[in-house]
Image (cartoon, rainbow, N blue to C red):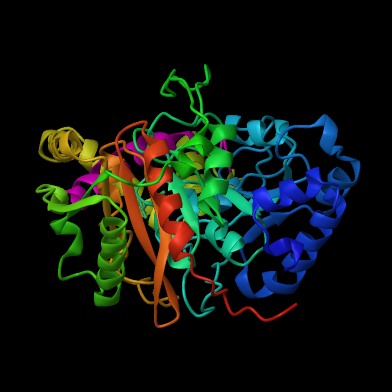
Amino acid sequence: MELYELTVHQLVNLLDKGEVSSREIADSILDRIQSVESKVKAFLTLDEDRAREQASQTCRQAGGFLQGIPYGLKDLFCTRGMRTTCASRMLEHFVPPYDATAARKLAQAGGILVGKLNMDEFAMGSSTEHSAFFATHNPWDLERVPGGSSGGSAAAVAADEVPFSLGSDTGGSIRQPASFCGVVGFRPTYGRVSRWGVVAFASSLDQVGVFSKDVRDSALVMNLIAGHDPLDSTSVNLEVPDYTAFLNKGIKGMKIAYPREHFGPGVQNEIKQSVYQALQWFEQNGAVVEEVSLPHSEYALPAYYLVATAEASANLARFDGVRFGLRDEGADNIIELFSRSRANGFGAEVKRRIMLGTYALSSGYYDAYYLKALKVRRLIWEDFQKVFGDYDLIISPTTPTTAFKLGEKLGDPLTEYMTDILTVPVNMAGLPGISIPCGFAGGLPIGMQIIGKAFAEGTILQAAYAFEQSNRPNQKPPLGVN
Ligand code: GLN
């Protein structure tokens, strides 16, 4: 095995035993990036010099848990001194003067930030094709999308360009690309990880989370990033357990529900079969597995696209060419300055969302659309509450299909929105969820989604880890031997 193939915990172990140096790890990772990045195109910004220099200076004994471990960040985490573009022309040259809290915590733990990862512009999309700069390719099939919006973060981990990365999940943007790329993608409960310094898309839905090669690494990174932050008033002041303590608890007696609505006719057959097999595995290993109903799930997607766009239209008002972002230099007056800067700075999908959201919030339509969506949101939350009265976890496919072809859905936003149908209910209810690999169809990874009660991230990791121990796929993306 090459160093670039290893997980965080394997690398930490080698470092602690003195068997490798952080410089060797950084060199291995940067060589790997050199050899595959032209195919995968996961990075918007790569800082090799900084990574090498930091790796040479690092001293394992003196530092935190991540001392000498490379990682990448979705390009919406503000990073001091490294540009943060949100994959938008609007912020192409924006270099933040501070670090997002989650980024700061990783840096303080000694991690080495290699670069910033591609995404759909302002996290709006499911394919990473809506980046203003270029599309990222799925390491399993370079003709296909990696998913989105955190497609760069997922693809970089799948292609062994970094051992782990952070992303954000507003409607599925961690779990869906994790599923398409065959990696672990974990979205914690709303409020568990600080959103401070993470450029906002829809503030009541956004949550920071982790991409990793295995479940243990998710738990380890969660230990570092979770917790209350006085700078984010929606971050919750609850004790953060040691998430690794859950890993070996097993699944005996656990009560698992699978919602019939998540196995409907729109879900690819091989995906249903894989998840049913996984459910059987849970049952054979001592869990109680039963079918349930989440009757309002069919309304989650339309309601999500009202709430998310409404919040986006408000959040993105700050990009006016004056306070933030690209400034049009040819305008004669302030109105023209705003409108020309926004017209040139935002891409088509972002404009579509701003228009939808502004419409849903406008007087006369507010009650019919936005308020109605909030009521539906409440019903979705109640569906989950009911099931979680009797069960510990809910399991379903993460996505209705495996990764689709680049360009396939570009002309048809609605079919692209449909790829989030199984992930958005979790965001609407503010719950935690993970996607872990559970099989392949036609050489493409399939993801299984495990949803937990609010702030019961440990239970999710417990079940995911148990499953992974006996069902870990050993295929690797066919990127060639380097
Ligand atoms: N794909 C969904 C959307 O376009 C979710 C995006 C996200 O989670 N950031 O809104």
x, y percent for residue 145: 47, 70
Give the residue drawn at x 72%, y 68%: 1
Residue at x 73%, y 65% (from the top left corner): 33
Vertical arrangement, residue 145 with respect to residue 109, above or below: below
* Region of the chain picked out in magenta, as a range: 300-325
Where does residue 222 sit, x and y in percent of width and height? Answer: 53, 37
Q: Foreground residue, 273 or 267?
A: 273
Relative image position of residue 92 (x, y in whole percent): 63, 50
| Image quadrant occupied by the C terminus | bottom right
Q: Residue at x 28, y 60 (%)?
A: 284
User: Which of the pair 15/330 is nearer the observer?
Assistant: 15
Specify the principal SS of the magenta part: helix
Q: Tell whether position 303 is magenta.
A: yes
Quarter of the image for residue 63 reads top right
Taking 66 as reference, is 440 left or right?
left
In-image side of 380 versus 402 (left or right): left
Residue 125 appears in view: no
